[in-house]
Image (cartoon, grey):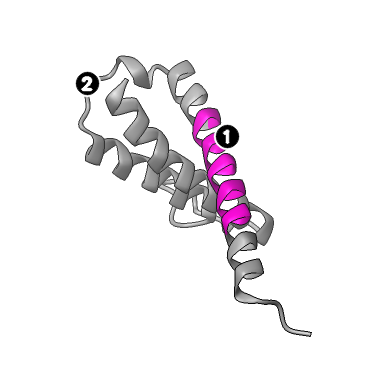
């Protein structure tokens, strides 16, 4: 039996709420780590900070690593790195406002 469109819309709304909550948790986690590392005290524009986070995410996904040989990370590292990058982008935006 097919679901009515209203039920699908309700499920989508619930999933969007879950996604927003997950992104918030990830952004807060990355933000706390960034503050502990001293990034809150650095005067840098948002685009530069986001580019640095993207480079970091690429490194953990198994992209080229500077001067260390750049071994590829297994597929388990890729799935968590994707979340990290999204959270890093959200954190970069949140850090600039704070």
Q: Position of residue 86 (x, y in %)?
A: 46, 47
Residue drawn 43% across and 43% down? 56
Q: Which is the main secondary structure of the residues drawn in magenta? A: helix
Residue drawn 57% across and 34% down? 25
Disc 2: CA contacts within 10 A as few (<14), some (14-19) or many (>=20):
few
In the displayed structure, does residue 86 sit left or right of residue 74?
A: left
In the displayed structure, does residue 52 sit left or right of residue 2?
A: left
Quadrant of the image containing the C terminus: top left
Residue 45 occupies which quadrant of the picture? top left
**Residue 22 covered by magenta stretch:** yes
User: How much space separates mark 2 and mark 1, taking CA atoms?
Assistant: 25 Å
Q: Position of residue 70 (x, y in %)?
A: 50, 54
Residue 10 occupies which quadrant of the picture? bottom right
**Badge 2 is on which residue?**
43
**Badge 1 is on which residue?**
25
| Residue 58 or residue 85, whichever sits in front | 85
**Residue 62 covered by magenta stretch:** no
Span colored in magenta: 13-29
Residue drawn 49% across and 35% down? 27
Q: Is residue 6 visible?
A: yes
Relative to 88, say whether 83 is above or below: below
Dot 2: element: loop
Relative to 38, say whether 11 is above or below: below
Q: Nearer the viewer, mark 2 or mark 1?
A: 1
| Residue 94 or residue 51, whichever sits in front | 94
């Amino acid at each position: 039996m097919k679901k009515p469109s209203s039920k699908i819309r309700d499920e989508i709304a619930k999933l969007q709420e879950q996604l927003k909550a997950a992104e918030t948790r990830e952004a807060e986690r990355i933000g706390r780590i960034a503050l502990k590392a001293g990034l809150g005290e650095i005067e840098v524009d948002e685009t530069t900070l986001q580019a640095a986070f993207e480079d970091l995410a690429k490194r953990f996904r198994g992209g080229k690593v500077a001067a260390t040989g750049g071994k590829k990370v297994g597929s388990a590292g890729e799935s968590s790195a994707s979340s990290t990058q999204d959270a890093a982008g959200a954190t970069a935006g949140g850090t600039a406002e704070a």
